[in-house]
């Protein structure tokens, strides 16, 4: 009891970014797994998962397709928008009604079908998600969110091999534009991210104790420290808004171009998302090569582009901090509202609806 009390206080004061006990048995399984033969990551259909950290407590519910969205018909005469992206698009850490796509849907009275997914989901998966699933749903426009701090890594075949490669995930291997689509593990059944029905003891420890969750966190940290230095990613070279290779950019470019090709005459907007430390770095040196390069590519294929990084210039540091969850790094309610305002003001689809 004393240990639990001490850990409960320490985790909050030291801002340890781990999941906290929910004191329920809602989390029988994990949140996401490798379940789809085309794009890998997905939630179990019609399931729910409660994620609790010191700055939020949210229950995520999936529909019959394993997406965090209400049930949607494949075809309808109603105007609709498809949203593609990762955990920022899915809305990790916020209630459904405070999520970007829900805010846009409420304001514009247009259904926004959310195909965003957490779980190392990058541009190749955005493309495969659209090609094999999202495109089946009638829609007039596409919102594609890219997160440079994750997307370049999530899409890099060589980096993924270096850090494990035991997930079932698609990658483009080769050189632009002549890529080969390959998957880590030759079968989805060999992925480490598969549903496991844990023992009752595990469920009790995970859902009812700080001690076990702290133990798991420390074990992961110990495992990272045990990785040979030559296999670790150099922190100064980790891809981001300001640090990416031409090969990494070309893979992102190819996915955007292919989504637009598949979309045909539908309106498409690509918007890039900075994380807090990238906003600070931008204020220090003012350089933004990624924004320029993405705009040039998007202009060349008739795709609208919105760079959210310079849109934060008028904010104070304190205001920028409020855009993100302190215990997690994803958009807060304020961050989702900020993105909604910027997208709505800049995407011609909403102006002409």
Image: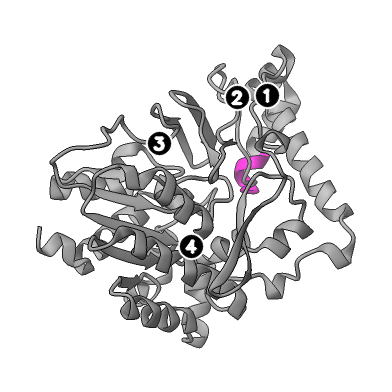
**Vertical order, 163 against 91 (above or below):** below
Mark earlier in primary sequence (2, 3) = 2
Residue in the image at 37% along x and 64% along y: 319
Using the numbered discs, state the Cα–Cα distance from disc 4 to disc 2 in whole angstroms: 27 Å
Quadrant in the rendering for residue 304: bottom left
Q: Are marks 2 and 1 in contact (CB under 8 Å)?
A: yes
Question: Range of the magenta residues?
Answer: 10-15
Rendering coords of residue 139 (x, y %) = 23, 49
The residue to which callout 4 is attached is 147
Which residue in the protein does label 1 denote?
196
Q: Are marks 4 and 2 in contact (CB under 8 Å)?
A: no
Earlier sequence position, callout 4 versus callout 1: 4
| Residue 256 placement, left or right of 341 | right
Question: Mark 4 or mark 1: which is in front?
Answer: 1
Residue 168: x and y, percent?
A: 65, 44
Q: Is residue 200 left or right of residue 74?
A: right
14 within the magenta span: yes
- Which numbered tag is attached to residue 184? none
**Viewer can see residue 273:** no
Q: Distance from label 2 to label 3 (Cα)? A: 16 Å
Q: Is the Cβ of the residue at disc 2 closer than 8 Å to that at disc 3?
A: no
Tell me: residue 65, above or below residue 308.
Answer: above
Q: Whole-Å distance between the Cαs marked 1 and 3?
A: 21 Å
In primary-sequence order, the first of circles 1 and 3 is 3
Say which residue label 2 marks.
29
Q: Is residue 246 above or below residue 69?
A: below
Dot 4 falls on a residue whose secondary structure is loop
């Amino acid at each position: 009891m004393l240990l639990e009390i001490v850990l409960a206080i320490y985790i909050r004061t030291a801002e340890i970014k781990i999941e906290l006990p929910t004191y329920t048995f809602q989390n029988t399984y994990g949140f996401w797994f490798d379940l789809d033969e085309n794009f890998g990551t997905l939630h179990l259909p019609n399931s729910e998962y409660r994620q609790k950290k010191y700055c939020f407590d949210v229950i995520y519910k999936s529909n019959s397709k394993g997406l965090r969205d209400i049930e949607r018909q494949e075809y309808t005469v109603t105007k609709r928008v498809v949203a593609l992206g990762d955990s920022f698009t899915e809305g990790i850490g916020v209630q459904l009604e405070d999520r970007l796509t829900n805010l846009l849907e409420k304001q514009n009275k247009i259904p926004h079908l959310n195909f965003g997914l957490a779980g190392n989901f990058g541009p190749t998966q955005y493309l495969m998600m659209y090609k094999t699933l999202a495109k089946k749903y009638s829609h007039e426009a596409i919102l594609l969110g890219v997160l440079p701090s994750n997307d370049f890594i999530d899409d890099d075949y060589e980096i993924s091999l270096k850090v494990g490669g035991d997930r079932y995930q698609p990658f483009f291997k080769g050189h632009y534009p002549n890529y080969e689509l390959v998957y880590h593990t030759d079968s989805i059944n060999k992925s480490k991210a598969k549903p496991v029905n844990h023992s009752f003891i595990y469920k009790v420890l995970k859902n009812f104790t700080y001690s076990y969750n702290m133990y798991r966190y420390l074990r992961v940290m110990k495992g990272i420290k045990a990785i040979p230095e030559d296999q670790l990613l150099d922190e100064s070279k980790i891809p981001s808004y300001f640090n990416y290779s031409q090969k990494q950019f070309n893979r992102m470019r190819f996915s955007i171009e292919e989504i637009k090709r598949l979309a045909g005459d539908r309106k498409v907007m690509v918007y890039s998302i900075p994380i807090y430390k990238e906003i600070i770095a931008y204020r220090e040196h003012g350089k933004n090569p990624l924004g320029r390069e993405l705009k040039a590519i998007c202009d060349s294929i008739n795709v609208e582009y919105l760079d959210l990084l310079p849109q934060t210039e008028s904010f104070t540091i304190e205001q920028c901090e409020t855009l993100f969850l302190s215990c997690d790094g994803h958009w807060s309610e304020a961050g989702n509202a900020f993105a909604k305002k910027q997208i709505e003001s800049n995407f011609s689809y909403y102006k002409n609806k």
